[in-house]
Amino acid sequence: MRFNNDKPIFAQIAEMLADDIASGKFAPGGRLPSARDLATSLGVNPNTAARALQTLADSGIARPERGTGYYVADTADELLRAERRKRFLDEELPRLFKAMHELNISFEELEARWNLLQSRSVQGAHASFLSASDTNGPADGQEDNDIRQGDTI
């Protein structure tokens, strides 16, 4: 993992672990890597890795068990979602509004793009379902309308 200078390394490791928990790599009740294992795999001091794990415990995302390590808290998903929602509303949304103002993008234009993304998402899910049930692809003379990565909106 490459660390940046914007925040302390232990905080970056804690964020990486939180991302892994949010993505389901570590399930509620599941054991997190030990500080020693984290330190070895990331090339950091074991105290730095231990501080990252303790940060997760302090925020309620993980729970320590004496002698066995740290485990994902049963409420980790809810806590992470609430924390990320707050961070988005407090930090990301103001940046978005500032960029919208600078670029003269209206809420109506934003809503139109949102609706387009939502309709394409539904169409893409429908197309994926159909392609999974039909392995031959589109019939002769029919277009393949699946949304692909890199398509512009």
Image (cartoon, helix red, strand yellow):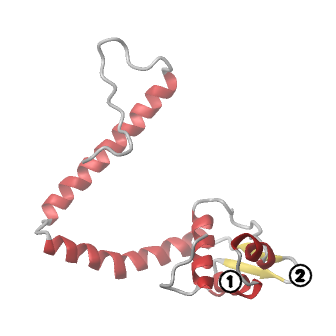
Judged from the image, the secondary structure of the residue bearing numbered disc 2 is: loop
Quick one: label 1, few (<14), some, or many (20+) residues within 10 Å?
A: some
Mark number displayed over residue 67: 2
Q: Classify residue 43 as left or right of residue 83.
A: right
Report the residue at 66% width, 83% height from top: 52
Q: Position of residue 57 (x, y in %)?
A: 68, 83
Q: Position of residue 132 (x, y in %)?
A: 51, 28
Looking at the rendered structure, the kind of residue marked 1 is Ala
Report the residue at 43% width, 20% height from top: 137
Asked if the residue under mark 2 is in contact with the one under mark 1, i.e. CB atoms within 8 Å, the reply is no
Q: Classify residue 3 as left or right of residue 53.
A: left
Q: Where is residue 43 in the image (x, y as percent from the top left)?
A: 71, 75
Report the residue at 28% width, 77% height from top: 95
Residue position for label 1: 57
Q: Residue most toward the top?
A: 140
Q: Where is residue 15 in the image (x, y as percent from the top left)?
A: 57, 75
Mark number displayed over residue 137: none
Q: In the figure, residue 32 lies in which quadrant?
A: bottom right
Report the residue at 74% width, 74% height from top: 38
